[in-house]
Image: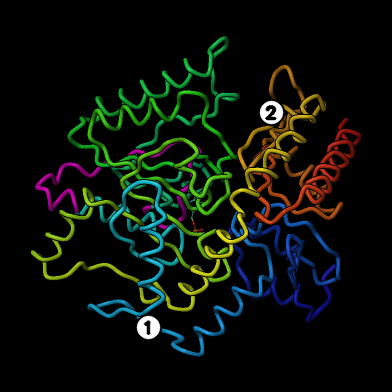
Amino acid sequence: MTLPNSPEARDIAAHLHPYTNAKKHLEIGPMMIESGQGVYVEDRTGKRYLEAMAGLWSVNVGFNEPRLIEAATAQMRKLPYYHTFGHKSHGPAVDLAEKLVGMAPVPMSKAFFTNSGSEANDTAMKMIWYRANALGQPQRKKIIARDRGYHGVTIASASLTGLPANHASFDLPIAGVLHTGSPHFWRDAHPGESEEEFSTRRAAELAALIEAEGPETIAAFFAEPIMGAGGVIVPPQGYWPKIQEVLRRYDILFVADEVICGFGRTGHMFGSQAFDLTPDMMTLSKGLSSSYLPISALLANDKVLAPIIEESDRIGTFGHGFTAGGHPVAAAVALESIAVIEERDLVGNAARTGAYLHQRLSALADHPLIGETRGLGLIGAVELVADKAARKALEKPGQLGAAVNARLLERGVITRNMGDALAFSPPLIITEAQIDELVEALTGALDDTLADLP
Ligand code: PLP
């Protein structure tokens, strides 16, 4: 029930929500979150929740970290805004660019700043096109991404995204963006196929797509090291070496979307390190500033940048950039967030508590509603099924996921269901005791849901 003039009623009246059923929202209204502390947030009624998604996979240092607040305040006092167009720069942008280039797991030569993961991927795509023209290869503009991949929602990045809800009624994807199969072994493997055989098949499908389109027309491949919003898909044995071999064979640029995986999530500083990836470009956001302020970045190596630098000279400018790109306050907060991650060894904590999380989730594998548990570091998911043998959930896809998600919310844990996969991606400061709290709530929510099933 929403009271007249309550924040809930005003939200219903004035606010169109992202990723929300806009019609249903008119009836049920919002859940108002008022404060955050550590791995917890509190709603307007004072109920506390363990935020097992770290917001949107992103509040890596936890809510209410004083050092980030201090960094923002100090920079806000000194220089609240400046841009980096037309040869201007400022300290936080220089420091952050240098830091990111220095910490990249493979040689990268420069950083370009944007404000969201979508903008970083959009920018990557524009730079790839610009480079193809610079190299005199105007036909080489096609981009390959993957089914169930997630790269954002702007026109280009939503086209890269391989999820139906991001395309339906938006007239997407745009021409020239192609999709190849997802690396979800549990769901997509043929009967009797081993992980290695499945990976070989996926790599062969990618090569066949490239051959069918014409290798001279394919510019780049975009992928998350571990798929996040597609349901936390950890690639199986042999997948990445085989896919990277195909990319090298056809000289196709590799863009690693590290928007979720970057900054410790997988128990490595970057997801690329977990799988020995050698991308030519990396897109970063979320954990970059622990989402305290919007900022994203794109790193590119010399192979990508050298032709772009020449082309900008031919045209007279690199005609791309955002008013708030490299915002000094956001950049200062990002630098401090990275410092906190490094000084407190939150990457090591993600590896250790992540291993504990997966051990506890695996122990639930015999529960009648669990089909698969998966993850690495502090990113994981359970795939819910109502019929274990058939690997099927309920009649309506997502219904079981939503039911368990709702039961968890009642028990004071915020998770997110992507269809019937229930994801976990808590702040990297989470302790084993808090993992116990999460898994106990999950067990209760699974039992409650099972009892409700007909
Ligand atoms: N790439 C990945 C892997 C993401 O998970 C997301 C967001 O969830 C994006 C890109 C898009 O980022 P944003 O929502 O900041 O545009």
Q: How is the image coloured?
A: rainbow
Where disc 2 sits, the SS reads strand
Q: Residue at x 17, y 54 (%)?
A: 306
In the displayed structure, would residue 16 be above or below residue 143? below
In the displayed structure, would residue 390 be above or below residue 107? above
Mark 1 vs mark 2: in front: 1
> In which quadrant will I find the N terminus?
bottom right
Give percent across and percent down for residue 24: 70, 57
State yes or no: Cβ of the residue under disc 2 lies below 8 Å from any atom of ligand 1: no
Q: Amino acid at mark 2?
A: Glu
Contact, CB < 8 Å: mark 1 with mark 2?
Answer: no
Q: Residue at x 38, y 78 (%)?
A: 91
Residue 259 magenta-highlighted: no
State yes or no: Cβ of the residue under disc 1 lies below 8 Å from any atom of ligand 1: no
Where disc 1 sits, the SS reads loop
Query: Within 10 angstroms of label 1, few (less than 14), some, or many (20 or more) residues?
Result: some
> Which residue is the site of mark 1?
82
State the CA–CA distance, disc 1 to disc 2: 48 Å
Query: Within 10 angstroms of label 2, few (less than 14), some, or many (20 or more) residues?
Result: many
Give percent across and percent down for residue 114: 39, 66
Q: What label does residue 231 carry, if any?
A: none
Magenta residues (range): 131-156
> In which quadrant will I find the C terminus?
top right
Residue 135 magenta-highlighted: yes
Between 87 and 121, the one nearer to me in the picture: 87
- Residue sticking out furthest to the bottom: 77
Q: Amino acid at mark 1?
A: Tyr
In the displayed structure, would residue 405 be above or below residue 155? above
**Left or right: 68 in relation to 245:** right
**Left or right: 158 in relation to 221:** right
> Which residue is the site of mark 2?
372
Upstream in sequence: badge 1 or badge 2: 1
